Amino acid sequence: MTIKALQQISAGRNGVGAFILQCKRMDFHYCDWAGSSKGMNGFIKSLLPKFTAAHPQVEFSISPRPRKHPVIVAHYINGHSRSQCVRNLEPYSILQKAEELRDASGEPLRRVTKPVQSANPSVRGVWSPYHGEGMKV
Amino acid sequence: MDALATRRAVSCCHRALLAPSGTAAPSRALLTTTPRPTTSPAAAAAVALGALSLPSGARTKATAARTRRALRIQPHYSFLHPPNKPGYPAYERPTTDEIIFNPPSSAASVYHTPVKFLPKADPRRRTAALVAAAAGTGSSTPSGLVDLDAFPTVNMPDARPRHHLTKADIEEMRRLRTADPVTNSVVTLARRYECSQLFVLMCCHAPPAHRAKMREEEAKVRARWGPRRRSAREERARRNLMLQNGEL
Amino acid sequence: MKRLRLDRWTSPLLAARPAPCPASRPRAALRPTTAASAFSRGTAVRYQSTDTTPEEHIAAPQEDYDDGTDHVRFPPLEKLPPGAASLPSPPPERALRSAKLAALKARLALPDRVPLQTLARALVDASADQNRLFNNSSLAFVGQTFINYHVSEWLLCRYPRLPMKILYAAMKGYAGPISLHHVARSWGIEHAAAPGGEVDPGLLQFSMHKPGDAFVALGYRRSEADHLKHNKWRHSLSNSVVFDDDFGDLIDTQDQADKMRARPDTEYGNEYTRMLAENAYATCVRAVVGTLYAHAGREPAKAFVKAHILARTLEIERLFSFKHPTRELSMLCAREDFEAPVARLLSETGRLSRTPVYNVGIFSGGDKLGEGAAASLDHARAKAAMNALMSWYLYSPGENVSVPSDMLEDGAKPWTPAYIDMGEVVGR
């Protein structure tokens, strides 16, 4: 045989075919006593039930953290986690923070300079100096 | 869409200009191909080099703005003067749908099957025939426009079997090889019987004593190699392997 | 690639318990007795079937035994030994209360017809629970067959000219254990540190200390497998199509067991334990597909495979490695009655320069077959031949080519025959 096979592994592209939300678990911590948790307690009472119902693909856990500031910890599929302190925030601001954490991918924050990142090869091909007619200068 | 249509293309070589929606012009698509002039390899090489060179000192301006200005080059002439329409002003928006087919200078993708390789029933064959008819050539690829004999050939094996050797010839070849393997080497036999060396190797085996002797001689030659020749050989083998695996 | 009767396979799987009721959550809960109360009496039994609905379990989880189950009709499947301290895997009733499992089901957008108990069973590897009625091996076998059938069918229709070796490699690239392990990781599946009845049912459970032998690939164990491996006997590709597994690999369970015995027991594991973990994850993906097939049917399972496995990217042109590209191209042209290929130098940057580049094209008659640029004439010619061969082998009738299983859908479009190639150019 003149052909051998070199083994390659297929690479996943989230959103092509199926989309998996990258945030897999969110922990909400509150304190019954401290004033900085006032907004968080209101959030848990009024907004959280709707938020959890809207996101069945995320595992939620709510636990007290006495005498500490309230915090939201989000765990992501890539193994990273991100925590957000929500002390002294209003319930709707906390909802905003929770949505930010839900939408994050878990990757470290990077400055994005290129508008499009793609694994696909360019349809037009990579420019090559050895092809085409070139340009007379 | 408007922005795309009015902006001058600088590096984009393949663009589709469509009339803005709502115009009364009938929707009509036309495909124009750019016939390539006959080029000699030397001219092609010069062009390829010319495309890479920049005005001297372009990178050594005092300020970033001046560098940018110096590096700003005119659009390709094919955009300013489309080949089929002399004096056609590029900035004027066309009133009809038009597809400008001006492929970029890039190597063809292996996913783009040459027309010759398409099965007989593939619809792409019909499109290719239309394009060839429009370009006025019998061949299916643009290269048909160029006189191929102008390009020098590089050695290529011909695997077409000729079947010109009879059984008696092969028996004779075997006899010769067994009788005197030194005089009747593989190269000599291939030349005498006008066949490939691979065919000679397939037909006859040298006596084991001869093979051992040849191996011994080769080992002696290898033993004389210094570190540079040895490493050069190893690197060459590694390079060949990389080429086979598509890493080069 | 082998002829399969999938519909026959899952029937015993579903027949083992009452038919699932599609309207609500199934009554077919895998129902053991509550572990604690059972162990206090010294014996434990695990039931796979029960007549009660899961809602009743949630309402009264502590009431066991007298839940109306007809134990004559659904006898206990396994009697644990009296000394057993714990169940090998979590009892299925706990699946209904696992947040992780519910989140996983929602994340995969599995339909309501798939019960959480079966999804929990798909997460129990054969190495964690030896009982085939409680581990995922049967589900995984169905899933593996289903995945491999759809991947191979899609590849054969999409790239009808792929050589067999490349086809096997592409199959492995899409549906092999490493690839499926990545799929499982991308679903956010985590594994338990050690399997047991007390862990969360939403965690993947496998053991690296007790080998499980339940999962068997589709293929034959050869009697001459040892010679093939150790004496490097030749075996042809057609031989391998018949005997070996779906990726063209030898099946050697004995060798695997030997390796398992010889495995060094380090804290963080070694390459072999990593392979075991990868296999457990891959088996879990196959079992999820098998679950979906068993409960929701063919179409949802096919859509699932398409979305999660076939939608991944594999650069097929990077699978090729040619030994004699120019010779093979010449043979191809001779076989197909094309003019003999001629390599021509199209351009060069100057052969006396320090880094010359040659651009060589290969022509057959007036048609260019391929082009390659390299630093030497020989390499450029070989590269051009490789590109030409690849564009032959990578011929595709189109992006959305129809596959035979499309015909099984209701209201399918009339079948357009798939392109069948005469086969690869056999090298000398």
Image (cartoon, coloured by chain):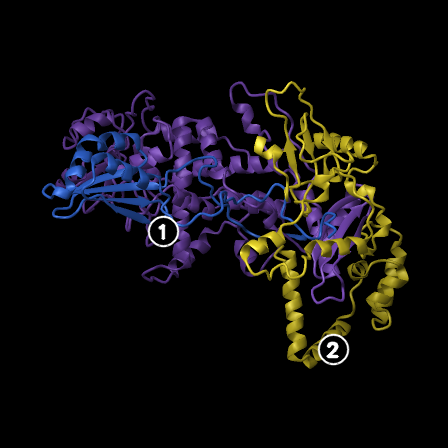
Q: Are marks 1 and 2 on the same chain?
A: no
Spot the purple chain and give its letter: C
| Residue C137 seen by the camera | yes
Check disc 1 and give the amino acid type: Pro
In the rendered view, would you say C108 is above or below B225? above
In the rendered view, would you say B209 is above or below A108? below
SS category of the residue bearing label 1: loop
Q: Which residue matches tag 1?
A: C211
Q: Residue at x 70, y 44 (%)?
A: B76
Spot the yellow chain and give its letter: B
Q: Colour of chain A?
A: blue
- Disc on res. B217: 2
Q: Nearer the viewer, residue C90 or A113?
A: A113
SS category of the residue bearing label 2: helix
Instruction: Choose top left, top right, bottom left or bottom right for residue B9.
Output: top right
In-image side of C133 versus C356 (left or right): left
Q: Where residue A10 sits: x, y (%)?
A: 50, 45
Other-residue count near label 1 (Cα within 10 Å), few / some / many at <14 / 14–19 / ≥20: some
In-image side of B122 versus C39 (left or right): right
